[in-house]
Amino acid sequence: MVLAGIDNTSEWMKELEGKRVGLITNPTGVNQELVSTIDILNEKITLVKLFSPEHGVRGNVQAGDTVDFYQDEKTGLPVVSLYGKNKKLTEEMLRDIDVLAFDIQDVGSRLYTYLYTMSYGMQGCANFGKTFLVFDRPNPLGGLKVEGNLIAEGYTSFVGLHPIPYRYGLTIGEIAGLFAKEFHIDCDLKVIPMIGWKREMYYEDTGLTWIMPSPNMPTVDTAIVYNSTCIFEGTNISEGRGTTRPFELLGAPWLNADQLADRMNEKKLSGVRFRPAYFTPTFSKHANTMCRGVQLHITDRNSFHCVETALHLLEEIKRQSGEHFAYLPPYSSSGKPMIDYNTGGDFIRTHDFEAKKVHQAWSVEAEEFAKHKIKYHLYE
């Protein structure tokens, strides 16, 4: 069984004993016995403050909702929000701590906001002379495969703060090292390594229990397809939010489920099959309206190409939707459309693209990143 960083007690005790510690975490921050990192640190060292990412320290906030400053009911510790208007840490937030620790399960996608909560935490520690400590955890998609383009200049956001691919093949501790070096975050970074993790491991191979990192990431299967379907967050197509299979289901009221499934299966994309599906979201896009579309069934994780699948799905759904299809407008007058932030540029939105050609171009960027990231590997 793999031991996560929080289970590597002797290593982190050396770093935290006698220090005043703040902790960025959520419900995924647990040891192998499912005891919260909050409770572990509160018992063993001087834990003085909690910091909340998107969805809250206890995971009770829906996607996109802001989290207020509050007091944690169990420990009585103050909780500082790092989602909404206060994504960056101020000197006042860090004044009473020596070390800011981070323990959150990542999902292996550049679109997931926890990466950038970590990055901003590192930047705050660099600015105000604090140590930043990461309790490392597995990348649920393994540490080998890299897929997708890099974010273009001018298209960074909280779903893509740094130019990394969709699927980057690093653990949360490893990518912290990459952020520090490549993007000049000069903080005192400490990574508490896992024990027993290998790069070829998917999450089920670790023996660790899957805890939902967010309300719409219920299973490892969700994480596997997330990089294929999260692109639809920038469109009027439902990505399955409001169902029991978010991101595995795609659809809209006007689509023909059989036709879409047949057309996608004809493409013979490796490692995936498409089944006609009908679903009614209880919230989010097309709430309480029957949607027709497909469910993605992964038949072989090792040969499945999530970003290639995303591009072919978008191309085909656009074609079948005709005038029904739309990219969603910007959230504000100063922002860009969500699809631009998701895809790292405006090419997809502004061109009648061919999935095959775009994937070929993006694969060049992925291959270069795959070579470059090796220097940040902490595990074989």
Image (cartoon, helix red, strand yellow):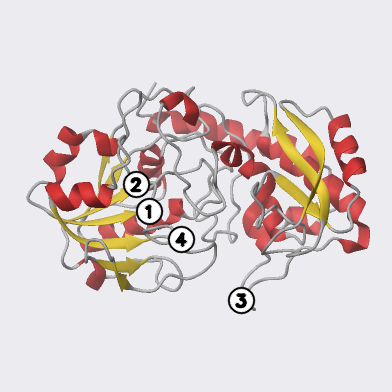
Q: Residue 363 location in percent, x, y?
A: 67, 34
- What residue would you read off at disc 2? 29
Quote the CA–CA distance across marks 4 and 1: 8 Å
- For image coordinates 37% across by 37% down, the residue present is 137
Category of crowding for the residue at label 2, using alpha-carbon neighbours closer than 10 angstroms: few (below 14), some (14–19), many (at least 20): many
3D distance between C-alphas at marks 3 and 4: 25 Å
Give the labeled residue for mark 4.
Answer: 55
Quadrant in which the C terminus appears: top left
Mark in the foreground, 3 or 1: 1
Q: Earlier in the sequence, mark 4 or mark 1?
A: 1
Residue at mark 1: 26
Residue 334, numbered label = 3
Residue beneath the point at 86% across and 38% down:
261
| In the displayed structure image, the side of residue 316 where residue 149 appears, left or right | left
Among the two numbered marks 3 and 4 on one chain, the one whose residue lies closer to the N terminus: 4
Q: Is residue 312 above or below residue 319?
A: above
Asked whether the beta carbons under mark 2 and mark 1 sit within 8 Å of each other, the answer is yes
Q: Amino acid at mark 4?
A: His
**In the picture, residue 22 is in which quadrant?**
bottom left
Front position among marks 3 and 4: 4
- Do the residues bearing badges 3 and 4 touch, measured as CB atoms within 8 Å? no
Q: Position of residue 76 (x, y in %)?
A: 21, 66
Q: Secondary structure at mark 1?
A: loop
Q: Amino acid at mark 2?
A: Gly
